[in-house]
């Protein structure tokens, strides 16, 4: 029942995004530029026939396209936007609805992100196919699809948790900024985690950020490692209760202290 | 000239008056640059050179970009706001004054945050580029000419709003030229590389000036000087032509 | 009284001469003519109210005459200059005030903006100090110049805006909806200042508004535009006789009122506790009607208003001799 009611905002948000052609083209354009630049860098670094930390030039191209798709599927300003809604008191009106605030919000964002992700994946796969040919492993590429969805889900959940600091601190810009950088480097968006200094790799692999870009990109670049999906699921199981609890605490605070 | 200086001074005073979370933003800006520098350090710990670019040269490139783009987006902040000014009719204020509209518009907004990039860029150059008087001179000249190309490109892209009356394309153009400029241009090949030397002149914003610092040559200096002059003239021409079509933000439809 | 310097090298012809101005927005079948064949002449020293309903083309006309917009067709000379070709020379000699835009920097003091404008107009230090002092006195605004503009009320800000656009002693002042959003007192104040400026310095005033009171209290001549064309052009006394002769009186009553019979007074609406009258002031003055109402009824509230501009315009169309094809 609740699931059905949550499907409505999800589908509406997705449909609304599709209808805004200017925004879709803008997002797509940005994604393609980032992907072209990053994959060109890695291809040039590996050289023809060469490799870097086990990745061939082709694998690095698929890696870059996949990791960027996972990150670009979410509005880049999401944390700041959610934070503004909380600190401006807009969130109070949402607390009057029969559904939990966080559930509705996640549902709306999931709708938007899934539409965006689908468009980016098609465009990114097309780009890679033209420049370096098919993905290094068909199985890996197939596993990357559910992994991308899990990556976006975990990222959305954690971003909302970070944004919820606005219940206590007014401004979320600084946390947003730090979060972004953590995902870029330790999440493996800018570089495969194996490129990190040896001492840093186990740290990055133990943090949840790796589920948001590295996991699907690793699969798409030809490493058939299904356990990555299990790690993603496990992190999601940990992160969802955290965001629910954080919002509940925050909403209680609003009710006690006032907006 | 006296007028322009007065406007710039006023814009600076305005920027200092509305700085809000000034230091927090400066720190974030610097942090952002440091993460990118860290990226290059990590990258070059696994890779020796990329098509002739080693770690030091890429850091010089980054210093040129941070300084040049920081100056443009900081002191000539309206470079990126031209489409918004066109679409919302904000050129009216400029056009009621006895001034040349483009220079007046450019100097009439300062964003101090972007000046944080200039600090990072200059410090980075001082730290990694083994500055000698001649290298410093080349850095200054190259950075300024790159900044001219960068600003001109933003003006051209922004002036397209005179013709299409939308401001999204210019936003994408800003991101594109910044992104393409942050990487050694030689990682691109074929048509993409050609594009970066022409339509989206990212090569001239940072890579070519950085190369000039490392391998000074009269031909290189002449080339970038000519390109900067060409883009500046083109920017002036496109803006001037577009201004004839300015509609002062009037949105008229038959229904209304 | 402050004496402003006389107009230098003022050319003899009219201040504004516009003929057949056309400005379209958009293209193809969706294009709309905001200004359609506008012809108007304004003499030096006149106070002209340029009025019309929203979307009549008032702002577009001002923007053409100040050189901000290029017309698609037509000719114009403002102080002898073609605005869209000699915009910068013209800008030195005219002042422009847009009610919905600001010349002032919000975070800074007005004086800081004046300082910048003085440099732009090439005023030397002495002239600048003298002008700011003069205008501060004339507009009773000197004490507002050193506060950040964002801390001023709208009415105070308008007086600073006016100072800013008068700094260079313009011969001709364009004002686009200067009273919009101001409270009654501030409106009154601004109107008085404009008249004073005209009388003291001889500044030609070209004012747009959709407020009937702006016309009555500022202008000596009125041009009404609708759908981008001039549909009425006459002196204010004539306008008052012909078109603004009707006033509306709204009365709040404690008890239902006895019927009122005065020549030229018609009852538009009557309820238990309300009464709305339309008064033809050429037959009976407002004062006489008010006297009669106050004596004959238990009045709890009373207000006198002008009919809305739309009504005035529809009366213009009903009069003989309006331009053919200008109907709505």
Image (cartoon, coloured by chain):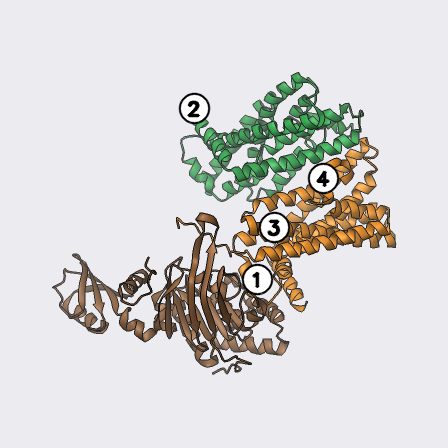
Q: Could you classify mark 2 by the number of other residues whose Cα lies within 10 Å: few (under 14), some (14-19), or many (20 or more)?
A: few
SS state under label 3:
helix
- Left or right, C247 with reference to A212: left
Q: Which chain is brown?
A: C
* Residue A144 picture quarter: top right
Please tell me which residue lies in front, C174 or B26.
Answer: C174
Q: Is residue C52 above or below residue B122?
A: below
What is the spatial separation of the Cα atoms under label 3 and label 1, in whole angstroms?
A: 17 Å
Q: Could you classify mark 3 by the number of other residues whose Cα lies within 10 Å: few (under 14), some (14-19), or many (20 or more)?
A: many
Please tell me which residue lies in front, A5 or C220.
Answer: C220
Q: Which residue is mark 4?
A: B35
SS state under label 1:
helix
Image mark 2: chain: A
Please name which of the two marks, 1 or 2, marks the residue nearer to the observer: 1
Q: Is residue B4 above or below residue B157?
A: below
Q: Which mark is residue A4?
A: 2
Q: Which mark is residue B84?
A: none
* Residue A59 picture quarter: top right
Residue A202 visible to the viewer: no
Q: Which mark is residue B158?
A: 3
Q: Which chain is green?
A: A
What is the spatial separation of the Cα atoms under label 1 and label 4, in whole angstroms?
A: 39 Å
- Measured as percent of width and height from the top left, residue B90 is found at 54, 57
SS state under label 2:
helix
- Measured as percent of width and height from the top left, residue B174 is found at 64, 45
Residue B178 visible to the viewer: yes
Q: Which chain is orange?
A: B
Q: Which mark is residue B94?
A: 1
SS state under label 4:
helix
Please name which of the two marks, 1 or 4, marks the residue nearer to the observer: 1
């Amino acid at each position: 029942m609740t699931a059905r009611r949550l499907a409505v905002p999800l589908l509406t948000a997705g449909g609304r995004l599709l209808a805004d052609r200017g925004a879709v083209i803008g997002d797509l354009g940005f994604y393609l530029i980032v992907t072209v630049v990053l994959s060109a860098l890695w291809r040039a670094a590996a050289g023809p026939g060469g490799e870097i930390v086990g990745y061939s030039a082709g694998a690095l191209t698929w890696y870059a396209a996949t990791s960027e798709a996972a990150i670009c599927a979410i509005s880049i300003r999401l944390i700041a936007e959610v934070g503004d809604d909380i600190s401006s008191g807009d969130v109070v009106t949402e607390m009057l609805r029969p559904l939990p605030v966080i559930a509705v919000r996640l549902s709306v964002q999931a709708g938007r992100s899934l539409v965006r992700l689908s468009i980016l994946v098609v465009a990114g796969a097309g780009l890679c196919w033209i420049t370096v040919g098919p993905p290094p492993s068909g199985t890996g590429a197939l596993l990357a699809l559910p992994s991308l969805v899990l990556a976006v889900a975990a990222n959305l959940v954690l971003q909302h948790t970070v944004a919820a600091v606005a219940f206590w601190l007014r401004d979320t810009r600084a946390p947003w900024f730090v979060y972004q950088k953590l995902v870029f480097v330790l999440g493996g968006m800018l570089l495969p985690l194996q490129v990190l200094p040896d001492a840093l790799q186990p740290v990055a692999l133990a943090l949840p950020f790796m589920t948001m870009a590295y996991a699907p990109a690793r699969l798409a670049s030809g490493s058939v490692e299904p356990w990555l999906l299990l790690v993603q699921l496990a992190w999601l199981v940990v992160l969802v209760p955290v965001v629910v609890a954080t919002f509940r605490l925050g909403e209680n605070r609003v009710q006690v202290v006032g907006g | 000239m006296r007028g322009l200086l007065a406007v710039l001074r006023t814009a600076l005073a305005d920027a200092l008056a509305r700085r809000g979370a000034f230091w927090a933003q400066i720190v974030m800006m610097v942090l952002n640059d440091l993460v990118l520098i860290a990226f290059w350090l990590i990258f070059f710990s696994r890779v020796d050179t990329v098509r002739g670019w080693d770690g030091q040269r890429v850091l010089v490139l980054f210093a040129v970009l941070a300084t040049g783009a920081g100056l443009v987006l900081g002191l000539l902040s309206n470079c990126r706001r031209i489409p918004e000014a066109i679409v919302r009719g904000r050129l009216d204020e400029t056009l009621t004054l006895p001034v040349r509209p483009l220079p007046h518009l450019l100097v009439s907004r300062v964003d101090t945050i972007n000046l944080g990039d200039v600090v990072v860029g200059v410090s980075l150059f001082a730290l990694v580029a083994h500055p000698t008087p001649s290298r410093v001179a080349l850095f200054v000249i190259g950075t300024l000419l790159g900044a001219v190309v960068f600003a001109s490109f933003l003006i051209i892209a922004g002036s397209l709003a005179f013709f299409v009356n939308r401001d999204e394309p210019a936003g994408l153009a800003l991101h594109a030229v910044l992104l393409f400029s942050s990487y050694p241009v030689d990682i691109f090949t074929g048509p993409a590389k050609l594009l970066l030397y022409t339509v989206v002149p990212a090569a001239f914003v940072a890579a070519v000036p950085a190369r000039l610092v490392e391998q000074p040559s009269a031909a290189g200096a002449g080339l970038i000087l000519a390109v900067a002059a060409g883009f500046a003239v083109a920017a002036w021409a496109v803006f001037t032509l577009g201004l004839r079509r300015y509609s002062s933000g009037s949105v008229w439809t038959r229904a209304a | 009284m402050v004496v402003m310097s006389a107009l230098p090298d003022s050319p003899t012809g009219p201040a504004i001469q516009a003929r057949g101005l056309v400005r379209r927005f958009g293209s193809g079948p969706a294009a709309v003519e905001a200004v359609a064949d506008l012809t108007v002449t304004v003499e030096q020293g006149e106070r002209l109210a340029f009025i019309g309903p929203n979307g009549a083309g008032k702002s577009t006309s001002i923007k053409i005459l100040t050189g901000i917009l290029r017309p698609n067709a037509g000719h114009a000379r403002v102080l002898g200059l073609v605005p869209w070709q000699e915009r910068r020379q013209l800008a030195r000699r005219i002042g422009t005030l847009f009610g919905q835009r600001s010349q002032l920097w919000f975070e800074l003091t007005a004086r800081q903006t004046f300082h910048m404008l003085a440099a732009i107009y090439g005023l030397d230090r002495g002239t600048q100090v003298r002008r700011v002092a003069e205008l501060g006195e004339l507009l009773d605004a000197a004490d507002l110049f050193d506060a950040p503009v964002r801390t001023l009320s709208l009415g105070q800000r308008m007086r600073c805006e006016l100072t800013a656009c008068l700094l260079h002693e313009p011969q001709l002042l364009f004002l686009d909806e200067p009273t919009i959003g101001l409270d009654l007192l501030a409106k009154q104040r601004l109107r008085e200042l404009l008249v004073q400026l005209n009388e003291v310095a001889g500044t030609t005033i070209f004012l747009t508004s959709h407020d009937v009171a702006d016309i009555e209290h500022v202008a000596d001549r009125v041009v009404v535009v609708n759908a981008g064309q001039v549909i009425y052009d006459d002196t204010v006394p004539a306008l008052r006789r012909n078109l603004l002769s009707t006033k509306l009186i709204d009365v709040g009553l404690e008890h239902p009122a006895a019927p009122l019979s005065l020549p030229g007074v018609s009852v538009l609406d009557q309820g238990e506790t309300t009464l709305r009258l339309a008064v033809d002031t050429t037959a009976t003055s407002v004062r006489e009607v008010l006297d009669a109402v106050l004596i004959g009824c238990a009045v709890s509230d009373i207000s006198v208003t002008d009919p809305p501009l739309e009504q005035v315009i529809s009366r213009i169309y009903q009069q003989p001799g309006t331009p053919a094809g200008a109907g709505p």
